[in-house]
Image: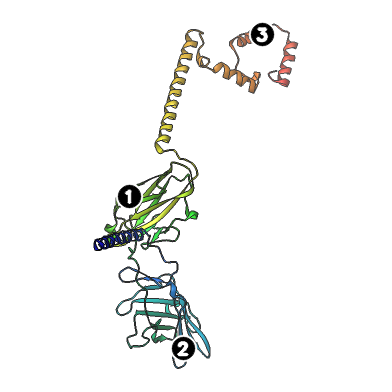
Amino acid sequence: MRSEGCHLKASLLDYLLILVTAVVLQGLGTVAVAVPRSKCYALDNSSRIVDFSSWIGLPFEYEDKDSDLVIRFCKDVERRSQMGYVDFGRFDGFNGFVAGSGHVDFVQGFYNGDLLKCEDSYDKRGRTAQVNIICGNCSNGQCKGGFGCICRVTYESSCRAFVELAIPCEKPGPRVFEGFTVGFNPRSSEIVYNGMTQIGFEMSHHEFSFRTEQINVALYISAIASVSTLVRKPSFKVSPEKGLNVKLSGSGATGSPPTTLSPTVLIVDWRCEKAHSMPFEVNITIPIEGYEPVQFFLTKMCEYRQDQGGDSARGWATFGVISCIFIVASALFCCGGFIYKTRVERVHGIDALPGMTILSACLETVSGAGQSYPRAEDLNGGFTNEASWEHHPAAAQGTRTTSERKYGSI
């Protein structure tokens, strides 16, 4: 019985160990492959990240007859002597740390050193140095163990140095999909650059949150054409699970192969179903066949509830129907009023239009009665007066003519 109990306990412990291991591995699988915090890293020939951030500034010295050469890892290269220091360049963080070939594992470039007598040197960048890094020991058997050492130094000229450095390299990290980018504009890489998630999107950051009123975000995805068919259909996960409605659309949502010349578009439609004090996290995962999946986080604030797109569409439809009814009713009213005035009130012309009487009265009030159009009875009265004026004496007529010249129509 005791042996059976021990076997049962052992099986339970093994089951728990397997369960915990599976959970841990699943948790590790959901971590985004983020770009290292420093520029002191490289991708090896198998596209795996090798991070040397802990080596920054570590000195390596090589003693020569007249001078010593000192490398400060990922910082600079100097030649020191009794005459002083000569700078052979500073570490170039942009494409300054790449994979090597042959027995060389990595290559570091140092540029923009001292210019004295090197104004026309390599790429006109002053004194420069190239450090060839070997993961292991020197070929001549020097510096076994420890942090490594400089195997040899050769000078192409007084302006350019080649250094061979043997160190125990760091353990390679995850394999990244080189050439893969994700950005907010075509051929941009604010979110993912060279297969690595940029700082600010590798995890949830409150300061990178989108505002509530932004109901959709367009993401542009590009990759090298020769390997673009390895990109698969993306998926997402929202945290908290309830409160934010998220939908993916566009050519990028179907897993279409993106290229640098024709990027695919992944549209993230999100609407707040309820207000929340903290931003919602949307973890988007893009699987890559044979590589680590590309993952990044987008966050959105929900200060108030947002109506669905169908509600707004129905609102516009209602407004259009009401507008049509108003236009038809106005046309029927105008036609009916015109017919009534021409048949019943015997009014013709523009006066038969509904509302013209009110409009004429308003115009007379604004512009003055003297500028209004004359009525028929006024014209008849004018003709009667002119007929009576013909019998007035000549003096009266002269007086009237003078008055008309002086005062016009009055």
- Whole-percent x, y for residue 198 in the image: 42, 61
Instruction: Kindly tell me whether residue 117 is visible in this rendering.
Output: yes
In the rendered image, the residue lying farthest to the bottom is: 65
Answer whether labels 3 and 2 touch (C-beta < 8 Å).
no
Q: Amino acid at mark 2?
A: Asp
**Local crowd at mark 3 within 10 Å, few (<14), some, or many (≥20)?**
few
Q: Which mark's residue is nearer the viewer, 3 or 2?
A: 2
Residue 65, percent from left and from top: 45, 93
Per the image, label 3 sits on a secondary structure element best described as helix
For the question of whether residue 225 can be seen, the reply is: no
Name the amino acid type tagged 3.
Answer: Asn
Question: Are the residues tagged 2 and 1 within 8 Å (C-beta)?
Answer: no
Instruction: Report crowding for label 2: few under 14, some 14 to 19, many 20 or more residues within 10 A (C-alpha).
Output: some
Secondary structure, mark 2, is strand
Q: Residue 253's mark?
A: 1
Q: Image quadrant of residue 71?
A: bottom left
- In front: 128, or 266? 266
- Closer to the camera in the image, 212 or 322: 212
Query: Residue 3: horizontal and vertical position, in percent?
Result: 24, 63
Q: Residue at x 50, y 55 (%)?
A: 207
Name which residue type carries label 1. Ala
Decide which of 285, 261 is in the foreground and name it.
Answer: 285
- Mark 3 vs mark 1, CA separation in Å: 90 Å
**Label 2 sits on residue:** 68
Give the residue displayed 47% in from the left and 52% down from the top.
209
Q: Which residue is mark 3?
A: 385
Mark identifier at residue 99: none
